[in-house]
Each structure stands twice: as C-alpha cells, then as structure tokens.
Amino acid sequence: FFVVMSKTPENHVYVGVEISEDPQEANLDCGLELCAENDLDFLALPLLGPTFEPFKHSQKILISSDWHHAVVGKVTSSIDLDTEDDFDRRRGEQTLMSEISYCSHMALPAILLHTPKSAAIVNYARAVYSALLEHTYPMLWLRVPLSIEGEEEDADGAWLQWNAFRTLCNHHPKLTPAVELTADLPAPRILERWKAEQVKCLLIPTSVFMSDIHGRPALSLRHQDFVKQCLRHKAQIMLTGPAGAVGYQAYREHLRAVKKSMPPLSPIQAYEQPYYDCLQAPLQPLMDHLASQTYEVFEKDPVKYAQYEKAIGHALTDIAAQCGERGAVVMVVGAGRGPLVKATLRASKTSKVKVTVYAVEKNPNAVVTLQAMKQQCDWEAVTIVSADMRHWQAPEGCDILVSELLGSFGDNELSPECLDGAQRFLKPDGISIPAQYRSYLSPMMSAKLHNDVAAYNDLEHFETNYVVRIHAGITVAEPQVSSKSSA
C-alpha cells in the first residue's frame, strides 16, 4: 500500500505533509501548491466536520484518481467520543461517521484518526470498528505517539493503549498505527516492538528536528535509526508542524539522505525478500514429488551449499589417509537436482581427494535432470540411483553420508525416519553430514501474520504450522531447544 502508486527510484521516500485544521489554511488548492513547491507526495487534508465543503474555496475539482494519489483524509481532532457529556459524544460520533463516509466516497487511500483523548477509549474504538465494518476501502491510521509525556523511558503506555484500541476493534486488518516521533524516545525494547506492527505512516513533527552546522534540519542519530527501521518496513512519512524559513523541502532532503545512508540488501536479504511474511505450508517431499521450480528456489540459497561444501571438504581431508587410491565413497541421499553432488565434486577437487559418488533420489522427474547433468557436466565419478533410500540396497558402504532433509521444523520432511533407514549405508567409522541438529522454539508477535491467519476465519489455520521468513515481527523471549537428534 502506498499513497502514490507511480513508479519511483529505489531510494525514493514517500513524504507528505499534514495541513493545519485552521479553516484559513485547510484549503485544497493551497495544500496541493505546497506539495508541488516542496516536492512532496501527498497531503493530509482536514475534513472540518459534517459541513465539510472541499471545493468551497478551491478552483480544482479533482478526479478520483487524483484524490487517491494526493490526499489522505484527516478527521477532526477535537472530537471526543468518550466524554461524559452525552450531547458532545453523540455529535462527535456523527461528525466522525460523516467524515469517514466522505473519505470512502472519494476513494481516499487512508484516513488519519486522532490520538485518543484519554485512557477511556471504548466508545471511540466502538465507533471506529463500526466504520471499518461499514466501509471496505480506506485504511484507518490511528495516531499513536511513541511515548506519553511524563512516562519513564521503559514505560510502554503508548503501545499498550494502541494494543487495547486495536483489540477492541477485533484486530481489523485495515486499522494500523500512524506512529508519531517524539523528542524523547522510549527504551530500545519499546522501539523494537513496533517492528511487529504494520506501521504504514510515520509522523515526524518539525520540532523534533535539530539544526546541523549549516542550519539545515537534521534528526538525531537515534531518531534516524528508528526512521530507517520504519522505512525497511515500507512506511510513508508525514511531516507535521510549521516548516519555518527553510521550507518543507529541506526536511524532505534530509529524509532522502537518511534513506540513501541505509546499506543495500545483502545477497541473503535479496534472496529472502520475496518470501518476507508469506505463510507457506511446509513441504513434504517424501509424500509429494517436488516441482523443478521448488528445487530451483532451494538452490539459490547463498549460504547452505557453501557450508555443505566446506563440511564435505573437511571430512575428505580427515579421512584421506585411509581412503586409498580409489578415494572416498560419498552417498548423497535425497539428491534432488544435484546441488549437493556439485558441492561434493567441488570439495573433492579442493581437497584433492578422489571420490565415488552415489546420488540417490526417489523423485523420477528429478532423476531425469540428474542424468542429464551426468552427461553434460563430466560426472564420471557419479552413479545416479533412482530409488527410495529406505529400500535401496547399496552395493557398498560409504565413508560420508550427505543429506539435506531437515526441513523447516527439523522433521517435517521426515528426516529421522528417512535417515534411520539410510544409516546402514555408513561404514562403522563413517561420517554423516549433518551429524546432528536441534530445533528451537520461541514465542513471537506479528500483527501482519496474525491478520493473515485470522483472514481464514477458522481455528484450523491458527493451529497449522507455517514456514515464514519473518520480517514484520519480533521474538519476545529467548529461543529454547525443543528437540535434537544426531546421526
């Protein structure tokens, strides 16, 4: 989700501005001109109650796509739905509903809700939840300060208030926090917690900026770190408060510099990025024949096969003296399309120890690829075996048994059952790679993953194991060993 949907450079930062609720300033034309002059992407336009007339002082009648690209609605901040005054409460709810209804009518991408006036939030949350159920299109951004004035650094009152509010709204996926930077930041563990939330917008008051030696606005290093954290999770930024003589463009340029200072994705991160926060069912290759595309994804792992090659090389060096002229016998069980076979041959070349390789694979489709590799890649030392490792009768024992059956949970690919049947291939002093493994468990939190599972609207999916590369989430306790196994 982005307010601006056009293609932009990789280092582009989506920056908007909040327009004051002063009736003299809450003008559509002035807001659009302000965005154009300062190279801003969008504006948050106050709605100013049930009699809002956006074109009263405007010469522009925007088409829907322009509203969708350029404007975020902003509900009247003076509304207090939890006041004890019954008349004010009812009038406030009518105003809120009419403003949200107009935003939905104009297909605005998001609506900025004001921060709850006090700890009493039940009626406000009820009204917001009713609006969420009634209007399917706009996102609702609840303004949440990073810290509450007067609280200790370790206090998490702001997050607790947000959590209570979204819980009252039944964790609706279209309700997300618009986090507002404060001059004094809370403790690192509190800032870390916002990684688990779907922060779509980061509000930055101009008063939070300092001045650098050239008089230009700049954030402190700690503030910059939090901004980078939000940008990694695709948050947009909204400037609030007056810009002063330097103008909003100076703030925009600093935020661009912060974005450019972020390190590029590492090869591992680039490999993992398409799978961030995606719910995937664990593979069961013993039951199902994997597709070629699935094998290809495995083979792009930039770390695993390099480590396998290193381990096989060390094993070959250790047993070189006892192997004789024929060299070592290596069995790759569950060979797939051959990445471990390649790793074995490279390790043989590096360690200068000859090998005889048996590539055992039960998937007949993958065996076709292995046979083609044998013909085209000079695999003279490799014997292709199309068989289930549990039932295959090996012609000889092996010095090294190599497998990659651990799966995402250590045993979902039935590695204990399969490897138990393959242990008979090993010579008494043979080496198994891997020799042992451990599975760990840790509680974690993620609003996105919770919402994705909740969308199925049944208990079964909450009790289903998923493979996920967690990005928008955090662990809330140290991992503990849940199981371990060794060859």
Image (cartoon, rainbow, N blue to C red):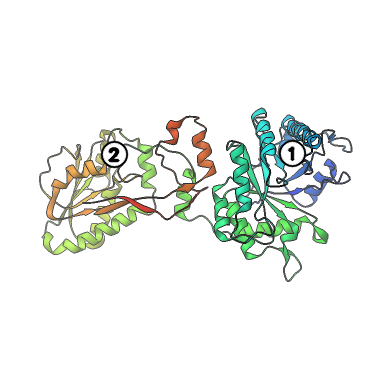
What amino acid is at disc 1?
Leu
Which residue is found at the position 30% from the left and 33% from the top? 289
In this view, which residue lies farthest toward the top? Answer: 134
What amino acid is at disc 2?
Thr
Residue 132 percent across, percent down from the top left:
65, 32
Residue 118 percent across, percent down from the top left:
71, 47
Return the residue nearer the eye: 169 or 9: 169
In this view, which residue lies farthest toward the bottom? Answer: 213
- The number of callouts visible is 2
Return the residue nearer the eye: 3 or 330: 3
Image quadrant where residue 435 sits: bottom left
Image quadrant where residue 134 sits: top right
Mark 1 lies on a secondary structure that is: loop
- Whole-Å distance between the Cαs marked 1 and 2? 66 Å
Q: Is residue 460 visible?
A: yes
Q: Which residue is mark 2?
A: 369
Return the residue nearer the eye: 263 or 75: 75
- Marked residue nearer the N-terminal end (1 or 2): 1
Return the residue nearer the eye: 411 or 70: 411
Which residue is found at the position 32% from the left and 36% from the top? 284
Whether residue 169 is situated above or below residue 199 in the rendered picture: above
> Would you say 442 lies left or right of 345 here?
right
> Would you say 303 lies left or right of 225 here?
left
Residue 261 percent across, percent down from the top left:
60, 61
Image quadrant where residue 461 sits: top left
Q: Mark 1 touching mark 2, by CB under 8 A?
A: no
Which residue is found at the position 18% from the left and 57% from the top? 354
Q: Which mark is residue 178?
A: none
Which residue is found at the position 14% from the left and 47% from the top? 425
Mark 2 lies on a secondary structure that is: helix
Q: Which residue is mark 1?
A: 81
> Would you say 369 lies left or right of 462 here?
left
